[in-house]
Image (cartoon, rainbow, N blue to C red):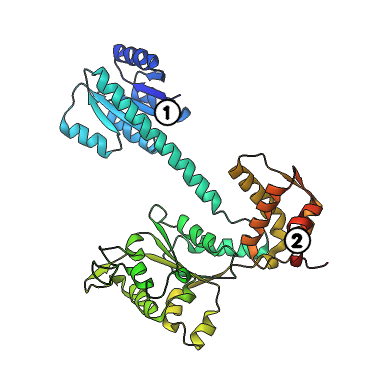
Amino acid sequence: MVRILVIDDERSIRNTLKEILGFEGYAVDVAENGSMGLELVKNTDYDIILCDIKMPEMDGIEVLEKIMELKPDTTVVMISGHGNIDTAVEAIKKGAFDFIVKPLDLNRLLITIRNAGDKSLLVKETIVLKQRINKQYEIIGESPLIKKVLEMTDRVAPTDAKVLITGPNGTGKELVARRLHELSARSEAQFIEVNCAAIPSELIESELFGHEKGAFTSAIRQRKGKFEQADGGTLFLDEIGDMSLSAQSKVLRALQENIITRVGSDSPIKVNVRVIAATNKELSDEIKNGNFREDLYHRLSVILINVPSLESRKDDIPLLAGYFIDQICGEYGQPPKEIEPEAIEELQNRKWTGNIREFRNVIERLIILCNKTITREDVRLYAPAENSIAG
């Protein structure tokens, strides 16, 4: 049920709104002044707040400011018998959802409440979705190696330093990149990911820098590239070791000058992007073989973070198993399954050449195919036998 707070110094207005909105199915609390209203806001989560502007002691604009400090996601509708354009504009600038004038028109009021309720629901859904996304990209582990990665990530994240993340496939390099973004001052802006290995070499420049209409045969309209899309935020260049030399030179210029040029254009575009790169290749070898620019390597590797393989941190397997069991069972809408200590031991005796990605797939397979409790025999049956360290 949508919960509404009415803050108004006129008893007749408070009582009328409580009666009307209660009849419409809303749960309504009332407060006779700003101080009382703020106390209620501190202790209760309201979906919508109706607040009068002209009140003794503390006026509605001041109440609005304090509500925005306490609970900035709250939907506030200002009401006043002394409405004017300047007051309405000030209220909206300070975070109000809408402004309506007394005497209140019932239809106008109910439409505003309905729209405010839709906005409040959308905010809540967005918060829940962000929490799910954040949990999806959580880094799990307590081994010394992963603690070192977390410590380094948390220290570097608040800066704008460029970071090169290395490590085998499936170790979670993207998770480190996302953590760097989420803990930075850019967290409210875009996190744009580009898999350099998945884009044909002839298209990588258009993908990164965009193109003008007619720049090539299939360029039927102007298109922004990933650098422009990430402006103000973070650009994650995954598998950068697979990027063509031509694209590397343009990326180097973008990093040096914070300027890019679309394919088919001579006009420079200023961008403000933090670049994080990742690779599973040994870039020093790629440089020796002429496949990677040494100057770009030095530009990207202000900070180096190496993500360890699962083989090197098997002590984290019990934690990882529990985490993935809870996560996957939640996705499937079923209660979490138990896993026997012997099954954990069996998982620790496996070679995880595919690292965390492979491990999660095996846990998902076990959840689908096993009964309520995952046993050692289940692991032997459903995890590939060739992965076993000992027969």
Point out the tag, 1 or 2, that comes first from the N-terminus. 1
Residue at mark 1 to residue at mark 2: CA–CA distance: 49 Å
Q: Nearer the viewer, residue 279 or 162?
A: 279
Hey, which quadrant is residue 146 in on the image?
A: bottom right
The image position of residue 155, as x and y in percent, is 51, 62
Q: Is residue 273 above or below residue 86?
A: below
Query: For numbered disc 2, what is the local secondary structure?
Result: helix
Going by the numbered disc 2, the residue's amino acid type is Gln
Instruction: Read off the residue under disc 1.
Output: 46
Neighbourhood count class around disc 1 (C-alpha, 10 Å): few under 14, some 14–19, many 20 upward: many
Q: Nearer the viewer, residue 17 or 201?
A: 201
Instruction: Read off the residue under disc 2.
Output: 348
Q: Nearer the viewer, residue 346 or 223?
A: 223
In the drawing, does residue 350 fall left or right of residue 292? Answer: right
The image position of residue 195, as x and y in percent, is 46, 67
Going by the numbered disc 1, the residue's amino acid type is Tyr
- In which quadrant of the rendered image does the C terminus lie? bottom right
- For this orientation, the residue located farthest to the right is 391
Taking the spot 45% from the left edge, 83% from the top edge, the residue there is: 294
